[in-house]
Image (cartoon, rainbow, N blue to C red):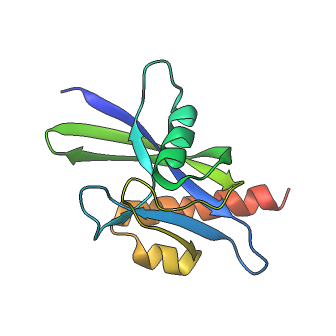
Amino acid sequence: MDVVPQAGAIVVRATATEPQFLIVTAKNDPQRWIFPKGHVEQGETLEETAARELREEADVEGDVVGEVGSSRFRSRDEDVDVTYFLIAARTGGRSKEGRQILWLPYDAARAQLSFPDARTLLDRARSLWSSHENH
């Protein structure tokens, strides 16, 4: 069974008080809150895919800080392995592709996310961001 590679973005923006993280609604299920992600296109690196999906799904431009981790799950009839990257936002974003977007502080974002593995990835992303910010 082939595993389909995807890449995703866990996006953070600094604010005066605390960092905020971006979450989006799933295209096929607007009740579910997830991180932007999608299929790798021919010739793309995983980082490039994460950045492109972020632009397509939330109209955000940013800089890759580092790799956060991956999540493997079954989607319809395929096994998917998504590698997530922490991206520091340079632009604010807006709803695209019929999705809603939210910028939330860590605790609120963690509570809003629909899947336990997404919460684990958010924990790792926050820790990576803290070490990045303090250098």
Give the quadrant of the N terminus: top left
The answer to whether residue 99 is left or right of residue 62 is left
Q: How many marks?
A: 0
Q: Which one is in front, 32 or 125? A: 32
Question: Is residue 84 something that shows in the picture?
Answer: no
Which quarter of the picture shows residue 81?
top left
Q: Nearer the viewer, residue 10 or 125?
A: 10
Residue 59 versus residue 110 in the image, above or below: above
**Quadrant housing residue 112:** bottom left
Q: Residue furthest left?
A: 77
Percent across and percent down for residue 60 are 60, 53
Above or below, 33 against 108 in this view is above
At 40% across and 70% down in the image, what residue appears?
A: 113
Q: Residue at the far right: name it.
A: 135
Camera-side residue: 97 or 34? 97
Image spot of residue 66 (x, y percent): 65, 44
Q: Tell me what residue is drawn at x 15 percent, y 45 percent.
A: 76
Position of the C terminus by quadrant: bottom right
Q: In the rendering, at what x and y percent does residue 102 appear?
A: 50, 71
Q: Quadrant of residue 133?
A: bottom right
At horizontal 68% and vertical 56% (from top left) the residue drawn is: 91
Residue 94 lies, with reference to residue 84, above or below; the image says below
Q: Nearer the viewer, residue 92 or 128?
A: 92
The image position of residue 41, as x and y in percent, is 42, 26
| Rendered residue at 75%/81% (across/down) | 17
Q: Is residue 115 left or right of residue 78?
A: right
Q: Is residue 72 visible?
A: yes
